[in-house]
Image (tube, rainbow, N blue to C red):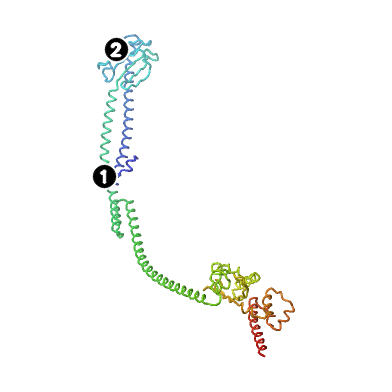
Amino acid sequence: MPNWFKSAPLSLRQRILLLTMFTTGVGLLLGSGGYLFYDTRTARSQKLQQLELAADLIGTNAAASLAFDDPGSAEKYLAALSARSGFRGGVLYTPNGKILATYDAPDGLTFLPPDHVADGVVWEPQRLKLTAPVTQGIVRVGTLYLESDLNDLHQRTRRIEVLTAQLSFGMLAVVYLLTSLLVRTITRPIELLAGLTRTMAIAKEYSLRAPLVGGKELQHLALDFNQMLQEIQKREHALVEANDTLELRVAERTRELEQEIFEKRKAEQSLRESEELFRTVSEAAPVGIYRSDMDGNASFMNTALLELLGVSRERGLGGGWTDRIDPEDRARLIQDRSEAMRSGEDFATSYRVRHSDGSIRWAEGQAKPLRAIDGKLLGYVGVVQDVTQRRKSDPPTLRLYLTHARSGSWRKTRKAKLKSAIPRFRNCSAIPRWKCRASRLTNSSRQANSIRRRQNSRSKS
């Protein structure tokens, strides 16, 4: 199909008309061409049959003239061709090829007999030539040559062509009128559907329905279209209800979010106030306060603890505070802390700190686990106290024991002297190490106070 037919802005009715006329015209053209071809072949065959019949009749009559070499009678037989139209001439040849008699039609055209002929038929655009043997019995006594024009054949072909063209145009006109009348049965229902579609697209009215008109296929199309409209109408109602419900839910959810945001902001404000209160209290506290994660990295240190360690806040946070722990106490401190963290229990310990000014200071620390609401262990919060002055006031023997008891290097003689003074140190192996150390610190303080009181009473006496 041509491209212009595909891209032309034609309506459905025009397309159907054009398609019908095109197919009908092609059919008529092929039919007319086939008929003309058949008629031409038939006319040519009839023309040849007439020529052959005339050649048989003349050859039968002129056989004796050829046998006796009688040109007069031979010319009379050839003159019989004048009774039929279309013959231009005829020639009788003797067996040796000599012309015996000729006939020239009185049509004003010059007929030139050929010198040599061969048996057979020759079709030319304007002439038909026939060469046939003349026999008497089984003996060939000569040759007959006939020549006829094709004017009657050409006239017949032209008449047939004109008649075929007239019939074709007439049939095309009839087909056009019938198609114009009948095509409305196809285009009218489709136009109704198209108009209904435009109305729904503009007015958004899906309660309309397409009429059941036209043929079986168009009725099925209308039924399917109505079913589609029904589904669209149902979905539209459901969508409207869903939108109304969604608006209510959005409004309700908005109120809930606003309340959640208000409560969250209030909780954040309370948290900030609590943190600020904690920082204020921590900064005002005379003891060191810190917070660490499960890896022992400090996330907060107050000023008192930073001064005790002799480090800046940037260096002390994280794991930098361990650099200030005496190397002899560092491994023990880390081990005690790790054991307490694995069990999730409180722990207390004492250790020495190497201050930035080079002095050695004693510190006692206690820490408690910090847990989330679900009980998950987040880290530890602890306090650290500088007990250097108290350590200096302890008896030398007790101080020596507290200093070296952690490493286990204590001679039996020294142990024997302290057993009577600190009997509760003997069972330290039966309790956890951090509790034992806490007990040692407590007992050491008690023993130091007891010794100090006895010394004061002796000096008074």
In the image: residue 156, left or right of residue 355: left
> In the picture, which quadrant includes the C terminus?
bottom right
Category of crowding for the residue at label 2, using alpha-carbon neighbours closer than 10 angstroms: few (below 14), some (14–19), many (at least 20): some
Give the structural element (helix, strand or loop) at label 2. Answer: helix
Cα distance between the residues tagged 2 and 1 = 68 Å
Instruction: Report the residue at 32% width, 25% height from top.
Output: 44
Q: Which of the two residues, 47 or 6, is positioned nearer the viewer here?
A: 6
Q: Which residue is mark 1?
A: 180
Which quarter of the picture shows residue 324?
Answer: bottom right
* Residue 244 drawn above or below residue 172: below
Q: Position of residue 146 (x, y in %)?
A: 32, 17
Give the structural element (helix, strand or loop) at label 1. Answer: helix
Whether residues under marks 2 and 1 lie with C-beta atoms below 8 angstroms apart, the answer is no
* Residue 412 drawn above or below residue 103: below
The disc label shown at residue 171, or none: none
> In the picture, which quadrant includes the N terminus?
top left
Q: Position of residue 330 (x, y in %)?
A: 63, 70
Which quarter of the picture shows residue 211?
Answer: bottom left
Which kind of residue does numbered mark 2 sit on?
Answer: Glu
Q: Position of residue 106 (x, y in %)?
A: 25, 16
Q: Residue furthest top?
A: 69
Which kind of residue does numbered mark 1 sit on?
Answer: Ser
Q: Which of the two residues, 284 or 148, is positioned nearer the viewer here?
A: 284
In the image: residue 318, left or right of residue 84: right
* Residue 251 drawn above or below residue 59: below
Instruction: Report the residue at 27% width, 48% height from top.
Output: 184
* Residue 227 drawn above or below residue 456: above
Choose mark 2 or mark 1, whichever is in front: 1
The disc label shown at residue 75, or none: 2
Which callout, 2 or 1, points at the residue further toward the start of the chain? 2
Category of crowding for the residue at label 1, using alpha-carbon neighbours closer than 10 angstroms: few (below 14), some (14–19), many (at least 20): some
Q: Which of the two residues, 244 or 337, is positioned nearer the viewer here?
A: 337
